[in-house]
Structures are given as structure tokens and as C-alpha cells.
Amino acid sequence: MDVRYEAKGAAAWLTIDREERRNALSDGVIDGLLHGLGRAASDGDVRVVVVTGAGGRAFCAGGDLAGNLSPGAARVEQHDRRGRVADLLKAIARHPQPVVARVNGVALAGGFGLMMGCDLVVAADDVEVGTPEINLGLWPYMISAVLSRNLPRKVLTEMMMTGRRYTAPEAERHGMINRVVARSDLDSAVGELVAELASKSSLILRLGKESLYHVGDMSLDDALAYLQAMLTVNLESEDVVEGVSAFMEKRTPNWKGR
């Protein structure tokens, strides 16, 4: 299996297990991540998904060039296979649970796109990220859809046109990473974030994430109308009643997820 699925408390961990290939995105890895995301979505005990890479050298070093540039596959088949990256990025965006990237090593090219596609990112302070495709005569086409929705235009343009790598502290300053911690503290930092997310209403997290992604492509008028409808849905939930009651009574909410 190219991706390991492990239940750890409230989280489902999806670990890309191709350490010898720096956890490159092969067809098997993409299929494994999609399967793991689907499995987590259907498990009522899972509140958060954590995506990471095996070992300490790479979170994911990008696409598997040997596979992507293989002359043996038919051209239409190669084109369809490239679309699997889009399937993965959409699956993360549409996933009902928060998806956290645990960045334990370099996140480059498609691996950087995978990292940026996750909802939240926790990284070791010695990792590097970037889009080095230009140095190979390529352009990060597929992941541009995600990067352009997450980064300032000038930052993204320089990254893609120069291919230079950014350190974790640099990436944090530019909003690519939420939390940078010492490598020895990486797992505890991820665990703290998982616990924090798991303490919230799973229903409201799902509705909120859905609305956050939807409004990005809407006009102001359409976005406000959509958000008004989502607010009404939120206010009809049992969890908002519980949340307000718990606040007034100075106690911890007992979320129902409905």
C-alpha cells in the first residue's frame, strides 16, 4: 500500500509511504489518499484528517516524473491520469472534516500543492517548500488553481517563475503555513491542533468549511445571498442552541453534530 491509514484518537492519519521515492505522487498514492479520505468521511469517530509523509526527508516531493513522463502510456490515458491530481485537490476541499497537513519534510511541486490544498498546515521549522517545475522546463499548472486561491499574486508569481525554495519561517510569513514548530515538537503540535478542532461542533465545521470554499468564486451579491442562507441553516441546528446555552451557563458544550 502506498498510503497507510491509521486511526489516532479523533484523527485519521493518511501517511504517504514511499520514503525511498521521497513520497512522490504516483497513481497509487493518489488512489490511496482518495480512498483514505472517503473512509474517514464515512467514519463517525473521525473528526480530523491528518496528511503526512513517511520518514523525515519529505512530506511529498511532487509528481512521480518517471510515471508521468513514461512513453509507454497512450496520450489520452496520460491526459486522464493527470486529472487525478484535480480529483484529489477537490476531494480535500469538499471533505466534511478539517484536513491538516503535517509537513515533516520538503513539500515541492505537486507536494506543495497537496500541502496548500489542506485546510491547515503544521510544519517542522527545518523544511522547505516551493514550485521548482520551471527548472525542469515545466509549469505547475494543476496546482495553480489551489495556489492562486491561497497566496498573494506577487508572492506566487515569484515562486513559480524563479523556482526557489522557501524556508518554513518564510512560508509562515507569507501565509502558506499556519504553525511552524521545532521538529521534535511536530507531533505534539499536530495533536494539539487535532484536539482543538475535535472540541468544536463537527456540523458547524463542515458547514463553515463548505461556505468558505464556495464563496471564493462568487460575486459579492451572490456570496452574500449564499451566506445568508447558510446562516439560516446554521441557526436551525441543535448545536447552535447547545453552544449558546453552554456559553450562558459557563460550561463545556456537548455537541450533537446536528
Image (cartoon, rainbow, N blue to C red):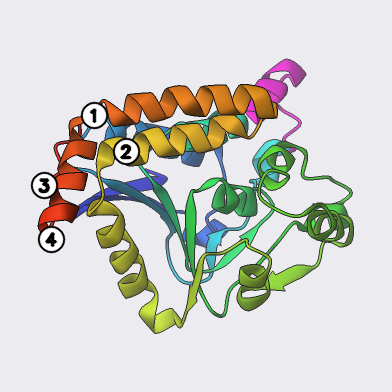
Front position in the image: 205 or 145 = 205
Q: Is the magenta stretch mostly helix, strand or loop?
A: helix
The residue labelled by disc 2 is 204
Image depth: mark 2 or mark 4 in front: 4
Q: Tag on residue 237? A: 1
Q: Where is residue 257 in the image (x, y as percent from the top left)?
A: 19, 35
Q: Nearer the viewer, residue 160 or 1?
A: 160
Q: Which residue ends up furthest to the front in the rendered image? A: 248
- Up/down of 227 relative to 127, above or below: above
Q: How far apart are marks 2 and 3 (CA)?
A: 13 Å
- Amino acid at pointer 1: Ser
What secondary structure is found at the residue carrying circle 2?
Answer: helix
Assess whether residue 61 is covered by the magenta stretch.
no
Q: Is mark 3 on a helix, strand or loop?
A: loop
Residue position marked by numbered label 4 in the rendering? 250
Where does label 3 land, which residue? 254
Residue 1 visible (yes or no):
yes
Q: Give the Cα separation between the discs numbered 1 and 3.
A: 13 Å
**Amino acid of disc 4:** Lys
